């Protein structure tokens, strides 16, 4: 029973701390789960108030030195509460549900971001984070800035001459390639960059054969940098049949980008889309760029 009593005491202490913190104008101790969430906190000038993040939160680089509460889908209520947060900011797919229910049961404010990968959800998430940490004006200002960046990119892409077919391939090894289908972050960022998903016959990610890759007839293949590393580098990746045999592979139109930046859908989303658009539409004048 000592463990049970200790756990109850920890939950009670967290409740008392959370109530006090929530009453202040700005939350002093923030736990952020999800790269877009932690990036937004930092973009709002509150990185120094973060007491912990999840293992996927790597940007800006200063966040890498913070305590981590593990993977976003396998959180521990006790681990989060031991940090005495004033608010917990999480993505829609954080979990497990039992841990989140336990956290809410202590009275700790748990703020969930909207689900989806669109400019609207990016802007809404920014405003929600701003409100939750006591910086609503900063949140609205940042949302307005990001909205203007999305709009500038859309205006520039209106002058493009084509809409290239893009095959997004996720790889852990050369023998385990998965291709993005509908309703994925990859589909959204490709569309924002003025491209079209090469495979739209299914939702989510599925293994792809060389035959299926060739049949999708991609003009461009998009690869995450960690996948290229897992395949032994770009030279080896270009020899994988699912890449080498496609029109894009034969013409050398293969784009490699860092996945958290490309698919994070945080405040840098318009810049990521512009960077991808620059690769899809060489020569077209486009705004923004990597920070």
Image: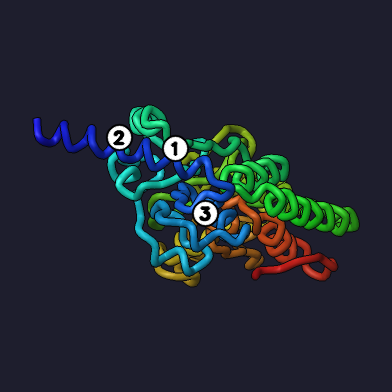
Q: Residues within 10 Å of mark 2 (few under 14, many from 20)?
A: some
Mark closer to the chain start, 3 or 2 = 2
Residues at discs 1 and 2 in contact (Cβ within 8 Å): no
Mark closer to the chain start, 3 or 1 = 1
x 48%, y 39%: residue: 206
x 30%, y 47%: residue: 82
Q: Is residue 223 visible?
A: no
Mark closer to the chain start, 1 or 2 = 2
Quadrant housing residue 270: bottom right
SS state under label 1: helix
The quarter of the rendered structure image containing the C terminus is bottom right
Quadrant housing residue 290: bottom right
Measuring from the top left, give residue 212's x and y in whole percent.
55, 43
Residues at discs 3 and 1 in contact (Cβ within 8 Å): no
In front here: 37 or 7? Answer: 7
Q: What's the distance in space between the residues labelled 1 and 2, CA to CA?
A: 11 Å
Q: Residues within 10 Å of mark 1 (few under 14, many from 20)?
A: some
In front here: 62 or 197? Answer: 62
Residue position marked by numbered label 3 in the rendering: 38
- 61 vs 120, left or right, is left
Residue position marked by numbered label 1 in the rendering: 19
In front here: 283 or 3? Answer: 3
The quarter of the rendered structure image containing the N terminus is top left
Measuring from the top left, give residue 250's x and y in whole percent.
62, 64
Residue position marked by numbered label 2 in the rendering: 12
Q: What's the distance in space between the residues labelled 3 and 2, CA to CA?
A: 26 Å
Q: Residues within 10 Å of mark 3 (few under 14, many from 20)?
A: many
Measuring from the top left, give residue 64's x and y in whole percent.
42, 65
The number of numbered discs placed on residues in the rendered structure image is: 3
- 230 vs 26, left or right, is left
- 267 vs 164, left or right, is left
């Amino acid at each position: 029973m000592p463990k049970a009593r200790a756990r109850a005491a920890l939950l009670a202490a967290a409740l008392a701390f959370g109530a006090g913190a929530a009453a202040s104008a700005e939350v002093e101790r923030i736990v952020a789960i999800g790269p877009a969430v932690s990036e937004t906190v930092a973009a709002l000038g509150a990185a120094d108030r973060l007491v912990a993040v999840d293992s996927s939160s790597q940007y800006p680089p200063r966040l890498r030195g913070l305590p981590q509460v593990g993977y976003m889908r396998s959180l521990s209520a006790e681990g989060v509460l031991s940090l005495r947060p004033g608010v917990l900011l999480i993505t829609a797919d954080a979990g497990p549900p039992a841990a989140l229910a336990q956290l809410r049961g202590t009275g700790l404010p748990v703020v969930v971001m909207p689900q989806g990968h669109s400019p609207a959800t990016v802007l809404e998430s920014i405003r929600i984070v701003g409100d939750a940490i006591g910086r609503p004006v900063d949140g609205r200002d940042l949302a307005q800035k990001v909205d203007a960046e999305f709009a500038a990119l859309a205006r520039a892409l209106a002058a493009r001459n084509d809409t290239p077919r893009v095959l997004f391939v996720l790889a852990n090894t050369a023998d385990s390639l998965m291709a993005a289908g509908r309703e994925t972050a990859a589909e959204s960022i490709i569309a924002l960059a003025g491209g079209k998903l090469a495979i739209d016959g299914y939702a989510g990610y599925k293994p792809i054969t060389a035959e299926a890759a060739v049949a999708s007839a991609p003009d461009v293949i998009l690869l995450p940098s960690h996948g290229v590393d897992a395949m032994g580098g770009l030279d080896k990746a270009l020899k994988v049949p699912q890449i080498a045999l496609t029109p894009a592979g034969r013409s050398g139109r293969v784009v490699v980008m860092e996945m958290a930046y490309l698919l994070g859908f945080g405040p840098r989303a318009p810049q990521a889309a512009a960077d991808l658009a620059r690769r899809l539409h060489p020569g077209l004048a486009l705004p923004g760029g990597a920070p």
